[in-house]
Amino acid sequence: TFHEILSELKIIDKRAKTWRALLYYLDNAERLKDCAAKLHWAMEEFQVSSKVDSCLKDLQRHEELRMGQERILESQQEMHQGLQRELQKGRNEVRYGFLEMREAMKEQDTSHALSSILSSVLPPDPKIFGRREYIQKAVKLLLSATGGRIVILGPGGMGKTSVALKVIHDSLVVERFGDNRCWIPCEQATSVPLFIELIARSLNLPNSSSKDRLAEIIAFLKSSKILYVLLLDNFETPWDIEGHQSHVADVLTSLASIPTVSLIITMRGNQHPSSHTIEWTEPRLPSLLQLDLDSAEEAFLKISPAAKGDPGLRTLLQKLDCMPLAITLMAKLSEDGETISELLEQWKSERTRLLDQPGGDRRNSIEVSIRLSLHSRSVKGNPDAIRLLSVLAMLPAGAALDRVPQMCPSIPGWRAALRVLRAAALVYGSVDKSRIQMLSPIQSYILLHHPLEQQSLKELRALYYELAPEDKSRVAHPDFKNVRQELVKEEANLEAILINALHDQNGDRETAISASVSYTLYLIHQRPRSEVIAEAVLVAKATDSSMLARCLYWYATILYRQGRSQEAESVFKEARDEYTKTGNQESAAQCSGHLGALLLDRGQLEKARALMQESRDTLLQLGSVNKAAWCLWDFGRTYSKQGDYKSACSIFEQARLEFDSTGDHIGSLRCLTTLGSALGHQGDYDAAESALEEATSGFIELGDLYSAAHCLCDLGIVFKQAGNYPLSLEKFQEGLAIYTQIGNLPAAEKCKAEIDELQALLTTG
């Protein structure tokens, strides 16, 4: 029995020294229990039970403690180490297996790609629109005595391949190189071996198992006395192979070193490859940008002739920034039956998605083409590039270079990011190099897929809101000319930012509404456009804004300046009602005065006078002398309309005194304008000319283009009345130019009618 017990304990002890103790813990406990029973029986047999009981209890206690503490701890450690070793071994096996598999796949892919390369047959001479001077210059450089090496750069979708093919099919190029004009579609070159093999295939070299295929190519070209021209099309694909740019550069340098080989490269971006090792033919070609509007229209109509004569076609082309790929894709939609007006509406909401085709490639999807540029190695390598691009995309008129640091204070590395974006041709410089611009399709894609994050958006809005502060946006303010000088190039940008802010339900829309009103005060005296203030009215109504009445008032004023009298009347009435609700009697009375002016324009003199008088009386009672003076001025216009010019002159003189007493220079000049017109009708041409010339100069000095144009037309009428048709024609033409500039089409049409009549009089006279 003692031998049996000893054997059992040895088994338990052996198990306790391994990580398997955990697994056998319960079994060991049972074995110990059994050993104890056997030992107890044996001790009784030998009559030593009392001592053995004590020893057994000590043994059992000792064994349990040892198993429960030391052995279990050791076993856990051993098990953990064992598992770690097994896990690391598994990781290594997976890693090595993956590497082997990847290499095998690469070899298989390369082998498959090599076997599937199509023969690089030179595509036919393409039909191309515009670019004539560019192509002539490229041909001249290519045919230089030392062998041409030229690079056609530019953004994706600009038609670089078409231009290059046009060059290589030029009669002079054909005459020099004959059939040795090779097209290498580098788009297929996803590895260096593929790139080299594509060159070999384009040269019709036989298949080879040589480990140095490039050496075979170079040897062939050097040994041949024939002139070759190689067109490396879409060269950015091999150039951007990760970790292999130096290898690709070596290939290119080797080709460029052969005197009998000329090179044409098309490549996204605006940087020449390997400029430190290759002497590209000078002067280098500029980056290829958008088509001129006439060529863009010709290209569109070639695909969709049914769109000829559509008044919206040129607007659509301008929306696309005359980008060749975008024009082609949009023209195909037109060819399929979409009208130009429908395409314009769809572009507003869908943007570049309208020109995206599922499963498309760079040739038939504008979004794929743009994504290729965004995924270039240089752009992906700069974390600030896309962020800066998102800022610039908010600015359709481009960004002034000196303002970029203020636009993106949270992008300290903006200079490096800008260099990357320029190199990738995602942005480009203006002609005078003062602004950074972006093609409209690229801008639309970025706005859609990479919207500006909130903090940067807030910073950009604040910067642009400061361009048109409310007090300085009024033409009478001494700083108005400075505001105008700053804003003249930023109007489109500010409008885009305001519209974006008004639509942003998570932003400060009340501040956006206020900024929209301030901008409208500026526009009234420049180009009375209504898009921003009209949107502000809608948002003010939707948000129950406290600024609704002001929005309505200035919207109505803009409509009146645009010659949209019926709409202006409706909005002025709405504004008056809102002012009345809030207890603002002064502004409500002012709205009534404007409604009287609208009645005057329709010839309803008595109703107009009654409303003007009522408005003036209310304003005088409220102590608003300046606004009451405007009612008096309108009152005088009713007499001019009636033909009572003497009474009109008297009222204008009185109103001018009231304006002067309140320091309202604009009101005083307006009185001078109507006074000059009334004097002309009375036959006092010299006094009329003097008054109107003074008023014109005053408005121009202040920057009030609308009023200056009105004065010029009044001068044209005075000279016409005096029989001085040449001078009258000159003044109307000056007025027409300003009305056209500020977008007042009704007034411009009236000018054109006067001009036509005067030209007829001068012809017959």
Image (tube, rainbow, N blue to C red):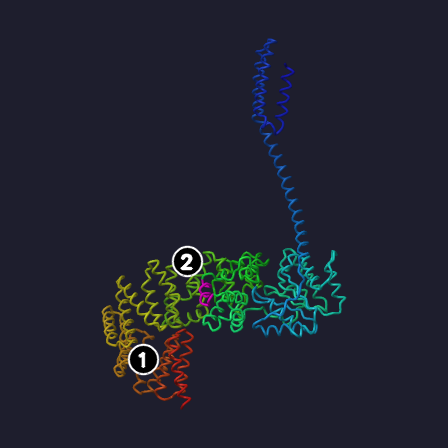
Residue position for label 2: 504
Locate residue 197 relative to residue 675 in the image: left or right. Answer: right
Labelled disc at residue 3: none
| Dot 1: element | helix
Q: Which residue is mark 1?
A: 674
Q: Residues within 10 Å of mark 1 (few under 14, many from 20)?
A: many
- Percent x, y of residue 592: 27, 70
> Which residue is rendered at x = 59% and y = 20% of the image?
31
- Magenta span dominant secondary structure: helix
Extreme residue toward the right, this view: 223
Image: 351 above or below 134:
above
Q: Position of residue 342 (x, y in %)?
A: 45, 65
Q: Position of residue 375 (x, y in %)?
A: 57, 57
Q: Nearer the viewer, residue 599 or 324?
A: 324
> Label 1, label 2: how many angstroms apart (C-alpha)?
45 Å
**Magenta-colored span:** 338-348
Labels 1 & 2 near each other (Cβ < 8 A):
no
Which x, y percent locates residue 703?
40, 74
Query: Quick check: is 77 in the magenta stretch?
Result: no
* Picture quadrant of residue 510: bottom left
* Residue 121 figure quarter: bottom right
Amino acid type at image mark 1: Thr
Q: In this picture, is 281 found above or below 640?
A: above
Relative to residue 40, is residue 350 drawn left or right?
left
Locate residue 430 relative to residue 627 in the image: left or right.
Answer: right
Q: Nearer the viewer, mark 1 or mark 2?
A: 2
Within 10 Å of the Cα at label 2, are there few (<14), some (14-19), or many (20+) other Cα atoms?
few
Q: Is residue 342 magenta?
A: yes
Amino acid marked by disc 2: Asp
* Image quarter in which the N terminus is found: top right
